């Protein structure tokens, strides 16, 4: 009797596990366990993938020394290779820009050429011959192509020159024809510059003070220059620090088929 009772209970339990759910035939207890286990494993794997991708941020090792002699200590840390951020409009320059003398003495490092020009005529308008001379210095080293550089960039170059006593400005890079189209160098509205004997931190601070909106300014501590550009129309100002160092793959974009040369007369900005 007891045996029969146990058999009936076992059959009832097996039948209950296989009964359909209210909405149709649902999974058995065993199947539900397998599915739950699969979900947990999948979740763990996706979490590993996300953490692995987050570790791909390029970093560089920066070291600094303190003290001297035997007591000198070297401290190193890893920082993000590129650190950038937008700029709040309220923090930008609101006062009119200081008048520029227009006199620029610049040497193109990659070309080994230099020029000393005044970008203004006596009446205050742009001197097209002077602009064309600077355009030639700003030409793409890799292709030899020349483009009409944004004259506002030359005005800022003149202001930087004025501030640092008219010292020769070293042009690291100007127009780059063999560059990705998203680069302001490609659009002839960017320059990488340095001045011998002048801290790039001081140059960076000055460039920031000249931004009334729509400028990109970057500092390259390992390469020893600053970048100054005018953004595309409507784009806000931007700042960044790049620790990538020399030869970091600049100029690997597709070659453009756009026409080159100073195609239109420059107009002096009213602001």
Image (cartoon, helix red, strand yellow):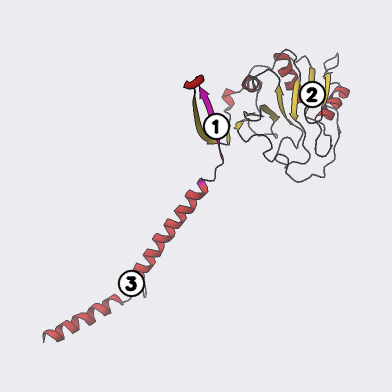
The answer to whether residue 22 is seen in the rendering is: no
Residue 30: image tag:
3
Q: Distance between the Cα atoms at labels 1 and 2?
A: 30 Å
**Sequence order check, earlier mark of 2 and 3:** 3
Disc number at residue 62?
1
Instruction: Work out whether residue 126 or residue 118 is closer to the camera in this orientation and state it.
Output: 118
Quarter of the image with the C terminus in it: top right
Residue 132 x %, y %: 86, 27
Q: Report the side of 31 relative to 89 (left or right).
A: left
Q: Find out whether the residues at labels 3 and 1 contact each other: C-beta distance under 8 Å.
A: no
**Can residue 175 be seen from the camera position used here?**
yes
Question: Which-is-in-front pick, marks 2 and 3?
Answer: 2
Determine whether 235 is above or below 164 in the image. below
Query: Badge 1: how crowded within 10 Å, few (<14), some, or many (20+)?
Result: few
Q: Which residue is mark 2?
A: 107
Question: In which quadrant will I find the N terminus?
Answer: bottom left
Give the x, y percent position of residue 107.
79, 24
**Judging from the image, what secondary structure is the residue with disc 2 in?**
strand
Residue 48: give x, y in percent of width and height: 46, 53
From which residue to which does the magenta span run? 54-66
Q: Residue at x 39, y 60 (%)?
A: 40
- Measured in 3D between alpha carbons, the distance from the residue under mark 3 to the one under mark 1, in whole angstroms, is 56 Å
SS for dot 1 = strand
Residue furthest left as drawn: 1
Q: Quadrant of residue 30?
A: bottom left
């Amino acid at each position: 009797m007891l045996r029969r009772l146990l058999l009936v209970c076992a059959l009832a339990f097996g039948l209950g596990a296989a009964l359909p759910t209210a909405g149709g035939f649902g999974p058995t207890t065993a199947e539900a366990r397998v599915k739950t286990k699969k979900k947990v494993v999948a979740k763990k794997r996706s979490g590993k993938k996300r953490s692995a991708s987050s570790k791909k941020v390029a970093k560089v090792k920066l070291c600094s020394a303190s003290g001297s002699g035997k007591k000198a200590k070297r401290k190193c840390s890893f920082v993000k290779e590129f650190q950038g951020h937008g700029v709040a409009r309220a923090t930008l320059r609101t006062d009119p820009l200081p008048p520029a003398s227009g006199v620029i003495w610049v040497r193109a490092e990659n070309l080994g050429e230099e020029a000393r020009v005044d970008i203004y005529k006596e009446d205050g308008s742009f001197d097209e011959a002077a602009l064309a001379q600077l355009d030639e210095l700003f030409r793409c080293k890799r292709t030899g192509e020349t483009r009409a550089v944004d004259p506002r960039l030359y005005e800022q170059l003149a202001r930087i020159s004025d501030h640092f006593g008219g010292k020769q400005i070293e042009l690291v890079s100007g127009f780059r024809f063999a560059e990705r189209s998203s680069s302001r160098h490609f659009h002839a509205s960017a320059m990488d510059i340095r001045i011998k004997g002048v801290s790039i931190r001081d140059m960076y601070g000055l460039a920031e003070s000249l931004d009334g909106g729509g400028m990109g300014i970057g500092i390259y501590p390992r390469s020893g220059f600053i970048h100054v550009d005018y953004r595309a129309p409507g784009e806000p100002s931007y700042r960044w620090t790049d620790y990538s160092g020399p030869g970091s793959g600049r100029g690997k974009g597709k070659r453009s088929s756009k026409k080159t040369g100073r195609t239109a007369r420059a107009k002096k900005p009213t602001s």
